[in-house]
Structure formats: structure tokens, C-alpha cells
Amino acid sequence: MSKLLLSCHLGINHELERDPPSAPFVFQRVTQTADLSTPAVTLSYHIDKVSEIYEGDHNTVYRALLLGHESGGQRSIVLKTDVNARYPRSAMFSQEALRYEKDLTRLQGTHIPCFYGLFQATMYDKLVSVLLLEDCGESINLHDHKSLSHSDKVQIFKLFTKLHGSRFAHHDFAGRNIVKNQDGKFFLLDLEHSTPHKCEARLTVLFGDFAPGREAFGCPELYDVAIALDFWLPANLNFYGSYVPVGAIQEGKSRDLVALIPSHMLRTQEDRDNALRHAEEMIEDVQGIQKQFAMVPDEQRYSHPSYIPKGRSTSKPPAPA
């Protein structure tokens, strides 16, 4: 079985009562990949310029250079390890490696990083894991919508539809698990929580339409991703502090909307007239959007939600100021 020799400490806890094990550390490869080595060969690789990306209770993630002693070559990698984890979970490393190496191997390099192997060793009677991946760029900030174009959001959404098309769900949608490389291409990371999944999404995501019901849409994960990416208008609109379901905003219901307004906001006739005008404008705006999307053909509306037409140019709800 091949081995990986790492000549750095990778966050080994130096506050232990015993001295930390001396580098280099020898890790046995527990997965078979053909990228870094061939079976039954002892590797001699050096990890250099290590910088921490993320630290959690179960693992730490580093960016580093992997230098091949024999070839003299190098590559930028991401290294995930539980060497210094508070609660190590070697089984999760094994599951993630299985996803990369077997279940989702055809997505490597296009939707998920290339996988360079899982290596393990025993330190202080504890099984320690090191998982090596291609460095695909920097993580994104999902809360900064201005930094993501509509095209970016579509790319991100399609990462998940591709994963679902491969019969797996991710179960950990977060900005830290989506990275963007220098060419503007996005990749999905952190497959340790992924599970087999039969996607039951029934509706196409129509950008700028009102959000459908969660159950009507059919797939909870894709629904949550579409909501987080701000593809839809909200299903409940703010009218003078009250959130009104879109289904209740109908022609002839303007006075019903006004009746929701607290009395202290309607002290004068001018207040009441303005409120009625705002209600009628909201109804008109909502009906305009509904009519626009009612013209979408069924073959576009009822399909796997990887098709996302541009729809409206704005995602702001048509609510009065």
C-alpha cells in the first residue's frame, strides 16, 4: 500500500503533556487514486507554505503547496485533517473520500475538486486522517448578493442540480463550501454529509416569479438553495408592516388590505386614501407578475430545475414604501 510522508506538523497540539511526534509523519493511503501515485510505491511529498482556511470541532482545512521530492513538481492543494480536532470523526473522512472516489468521480474537475487521496495514521492511539483535494479557489459570501451576478447564482444552483442528478444531496449548503477559481468557475466542496437522494423537484425555478410553496416545489434542498440565492420574490409581501400571502393579493381586495393596517396609521382621510392607492398599486403589480409567468409553457415550468430563464430584471417585492 502506498504511503504519504508529510514533513510538517499540520497543527499538531504542542500543548500535549507528551512531546508531539517528530516529522515526517507516515500516512498509509486508504483509497486508490491514480493521480498522485501508483499502488505499492512509497511517496515522499513535502507540504509547504501551509495557511489555515477553516477550523472546526471536527477538522481543520489548510491551503498548501504539495512538493513532489522525486519529480520536483508542485501543486496547490487543499488539505483537510482531524490531526488536532477536538472531536475527530474518521468515519466522515472515509465517507467523503468514497463520494469523491467512487460515487461522484465523474464530477471531479468540473463540479467538485479533483481528489488526490485519503491517508491515515495512528497518533497517541488515535486514528488521524488527511484528505487531499485540488485547490479550486476562494470561498464565497452568500450574504453579499452584490458580489454575485445572476450568472454566478445560476452556476451555483447548477452545482446542486448536477449533484442531485447524480442521486446525491449535499446537506451542508454554506458559502464556505462553495469556491470560485480565477476563471470564474464555481466548485462544490465538503461532501462528508452527502447522502443518496432521489430528487423530487417538480417545478422549474423561474427567476423573478413569486416563490412557490416548499411542498409544491418538491425538493427541500434545491428550494433552500433557490431561496438563499434570491431567485424568487417572497411569497409574503410587506404591506404597512403586515406580511400578506401573495394569494390574498387579488383584484377587488384592496379594502381588505387596508383593513390590515393599524388604526394609528390611518388617522386622516389622506392617510386612508394613500393606503387604498398603495393597496391597488400592489394588486396591480402582483397581477402583472403573475400574468407574465402564467405564459411560461408547461415544458419549461414542469421540468428539472436546472433551467432558469431570466424572468424579471429585479427581485424587489412590489411593496409600497
Image (cartoon, rainbow, N blue to C red):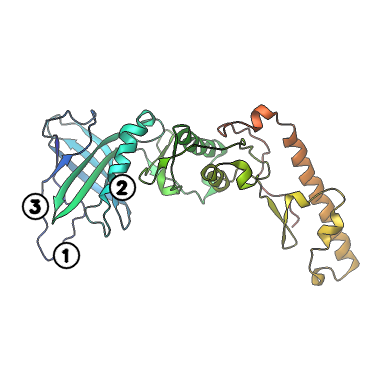
Q: Position of residue 247 (x, y in %)?
A: 75, 49
Of marks 1 and 2, the one in the foreground: 2
Residue at 27 percent of width and 49 percent of height = 51
Q: Amino acid at mark 3?
A: Ser
- The reply, left or right, for residue 97 in relation to residue 200 is left
Which quadrant: the N terminus? top left
Q: Position of residue 183 (x, y in %)?
A: 42, 33
Give the CA distance from mark 1 to mark 3: 15 Å
User: Could you tell me residue 207's position as x and y percent?
Assistant: 63, 38
Which residue is painted at 24% across and 29% down in the image? 35
Of labels 3 and 2, earlier in sequence is 3
Residue under the image location 19 percent in, 51 percent down: 127
Which amino acid, mark 2?
A: Met
Give the residue pinned by disc 2.
92
Mark 1 residue type: Glu
Q: What distance separates the C-alpha of mark 3 from that of mark 2?
A: 26 Å
Disc 1 secondary structure class: loop
Does residue 228 appear in this view?
yes
Q: Earlier in the sequence, mark 1 or mark 2?
A: 1
- Quadrant (top left/top right/bottom left/bottom right) for the C terminus: bottom right
Quickly name the residue at label 1: 15
Camera-side residue of 20 and 146: 20
Q: Position of residue 40 (x, y in %)?
A: 12, 30
Q: Residues within 10 Å of mark 2 (few under 14, many from 20)?
A: some
Left or right position of 12 against 96: left
Q: Using residue 159 as the reference point, say whether residue 74 is left or right of it.
A: left
Q: Residues within 10 Å of mark 3 (few under 14, many from 20)?
A: few
Q: Residue beneath label 3, please?
A: 22
Instruction: Report the mark closest to the observer, 3 or 2.
Output: 2
Q: Nearer the viewer, residue 319 or 39?
A: 39
Under tag 3, what secondary structure? loop
